[in-house]
Image (cartoon, rainbow, N blue to C red):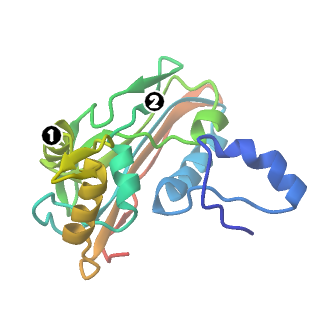
Amino acid sequence: MVDVSFMPENPLTLNEDAVKADVTIIPDCGEALRLSNILIGRAVSKLDQVESVHMMDCGLPEKPLPPLGYVITWSVEDLIEEYTRKARIVKDGKVIDVEVLSGLEEVGIPSIGRLEAFYADGLRTLLYTIRGVKSMWVKVFRYLGYVEKIKLLRTLGLFDEEPVKIENVYVPPRALTVKLLEKRLRRPEIRDIVVMRLEVCGTKEGLRTRYSYFPVNQRGL
């Protein structure tokens, strides 16, 4: 098994090279999306026809800590990238682009409370491995008020890559934001919780069938 540090948009394109090199590539390993994809795959395998696949998931601090109600546990660069590119979803059987942070809704989670969920570009390989589905999307959970704060940072240009001149030095705003978030939000002493809400609907032997999974880990990662 090898670790691939750079992964193309569609990791499945690496299959031929992997076979030739006699190696196994496991893309995007982690709580999400891989754990969620395993559960989704199990549900899909039980259905004769899949109609919809809806996923909500997150890793959150046990409590909504200021200023964002969030702590950094992974790459800050990748986190910001998620907030600046379009999210791909399947609607009416077609893959379309929607604005990330859109599709906002509140969801109640037992023992945790109210969270907000928004579209994220997290379908990845599912776009190519689940065919004929009418509706499919990924939404990310955050504590209430998070989306409004991130939109403010984005609107102010703090995620922009075009350098700005500061005292004869050109600085990309995104690079500065990465450093500041890393400094302020990296809190290894804070425990994480993991919340998922997965739902797959379709037909089995002529009957409408739904599989739902609600894994919650409150002990911390």
Note whether 161 is above or below 78 in the view shown.
above
Whichever of callouts 2 and 1 sits on the residue coming sooner in the sequence is 2
Please rate how many residues cluster around mark 1, counting C-alpha atoms within 10 Å: few if below 14, some from 14 to 19, many from 20.
few
> Which quadrant would residue 147 be assigned to in this image?
top left
Residue type at mark 2?
Ile
* 132 to 102, vertically: above or below: above
**Residue in front for this viewpoint, 121 or 84:** 84
Q: Is disc 1 placed on a helix, strand or loop? A: loop
- Which residue carries the number 1 mark? 156
* Residue wearing tag 2: 89
Q: Tell me what residue is drawn at x 56 percent, y 61 percent.
A: 29
The Cα–Cα distance between marks 2 and 1, rounded to whole angstroms, is 27 Å
Residue 82, x across and y down, in percent: 37, 45
Q: Nearer the viewer, residue 156 or 207?
A: 156
Q: Which is more foreground, mark 2 or mark 1?
A: 1
Left or right position of 104 against 20: left
| Camera-side residue of 33 and 131 | 33
Query: For the C terminus, which image quadrant?
Result: bottom left
Using the image as rendered, state which of residue 162 and residue 20 is in the foreground: 162
Residue 69 in the image: x percent, y percent? 16, 60
Residue at screen point 64% across, 29% down: 131
Residue 217 visible in the shown view: yes
